[in-house]
Amino acid sequence: MPDQPSLRARANAPDESNLPAPEPLQTPAQTVGPFFGYALPYAGGPAVRAAWQPDAIRLHGTVFDGAGDPIPDAIVEIWGPDAAGRPSTERGVLERDQHGFSGFGRAAVDRDGRFAFTTIKPGATREGLAPYLLVTVFARGVLHHLFTRAYFDDEAAANGTDPLLSTIDPARRHTLVAESDGPASYRFDIRLQGEGETVFLDFAVLDHGDEGRREGMQR
Amino acid sequence: MPRPAPQPEQTQPDATQPGETQPGETQQGISAEIAALHRAAQEAAASGAPVPAHPPRDFPPYRSTQLRHPTRELVRADPEEIELVSPAFGHTDVAAEEADLTIQHTGEPLGERIILTGRVLDGEGRPVRNQLVEIWQANASGRYVHKRDQHPAPLDPNFTGVGRIITGDDGSYRLTTIKPGAYPWKNHRNAWRPAHIHFSFFGSAFTQRLVTQMYFPGDPLFALDPIYQSITDQRARDRLVATYDHDVSEPEWALGYRWDVVLTGPRSTWMEPEDADHA
Ligand SMILES: [Fe+2]
């Protein structure tokens, strides 16, 4: 660490004097709160793929609370690979042009809890997986974001053998599957609690931060 | 880039949100609930349960969690390739001026100018490079430029309170802003949030995604705030508090704070016995 501790006030630092090797300790999450609306959304955030592109699909839905009411202050992110199953490494995720594809999108819900993205239907990142988008949900009252996946209902064969989807309680499996509701349109509602509660995921994460691993995974 | 001066928006206060406004509830009652939950967490830790860094999503003293936390256990999933990489943010995405929240308008914002710097690291201490950091905050009076913020404190025509930066090769970020004010909210009667800055981070893997809040040392509102206290472990709570760093302060200009961020727990936090079955 380049910082010099000499003049640092230590009053707020935890007392680690009796502890063994100082290992970096995880920073806790806090709610996104109600006032992100002028900060996190950005122009083009919901348009991962320009709507006029022939391969564009719409992924839309509503975020509901445990009383079945739409949540007006949630924000949803999606992240997925391209049609061939490759994560994009194009720079310029925020200032995307009309022709590229970065795979990342962000949409705040409207007053009725609705969000809508245009993107492409992703490919599977490896053989044996069904295609899906990673979906992340933030909201006032959600102290730590929630991860889920949006699979597609017109991929029944691949869904049936997907190593995650096929192990989910069949009664809840549909909460992970976006439903075709028109040409190139899929509906994916998110229920934070109660009847039809979405299956949320806890990733058994080892630390995979190194570039070598990332490069090694590109095909 | 210059932004338009913040304008007060002509909106009526929203109808009461479920779980949001409980005007009859006292701080004393909320504090007693917090204390009971902390005791329960300490007892669990004493009997050998792992101490979680993150807050439980079901934390009743923060009333808005009531209808917004899953009641089913999260399903353990092995991350696939898409979860192990992150979007490719780049320096072209963010203008250098976006790291200075005091130069977004024609005049200087009111309040205490601060420099906030630190490093974004992964669980093994490696820098998280070239990743997006976003912040948003209230002004020095405790008011957000947001139409739903009804706090009768003045907007500052020279302060929006939004900044972005891409981390450097050493994972570092450096922001210039104004120290935000505390503000009231409607969790219970006379509820006040300690001064904080909202932060959003991307890691090298999407599973490291983190949205959190950074606080300032010595805030008398810490003990009273159900959002800050939702982190049941004192040592974990401390990690959200920046450190005053006189080496970062600049003479005749700004006070300096340092806040390092770790986006993943140590490997041991996540290791499961070989035979563990999470089906
Ligand atoms: Fe806030």
Image (cartoon, coloured by chain):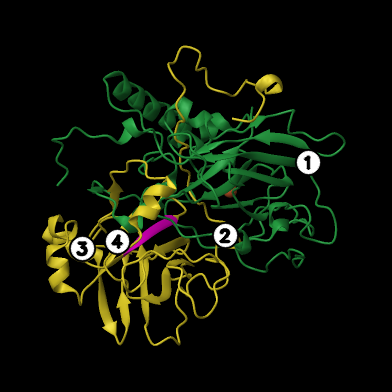
Chain colours: A yellow, B green
| The disc label shown at residue A129, or none | 3
Per the model, the C-alpha gap separating discs 2 and 1 is: 31 Å
Q: Identify the image quadrant of residue B250.
A: top right
Magenta residue span: A133-138
The lab-note entry on whether marks 3 and 2 share a chain reads no
Q: Which residue is mark 4?
A: A149
The lab-note entry on whether marks 2 and 1 share a chain reads yes
Which label lies toward us, 2 or 1? 2
User: What secondary structure predominates along the stretch shown in magenta?
Assistant: strand
Q: Amino acid at mark 4?
A: Arg
| SS at mark 4 in the image | strand
Which label lies toward us, 2 or 4? 2
Q: Residues within 10 Å of mark 1 (few under 14, many from 20)?
A: some
Per the model, the C-alpha gap separating discs 3 and 2 is: 30 Å
Image position of A167 with respect to B240: above or below: below
Which label lies toward us, 3 or 1? 3
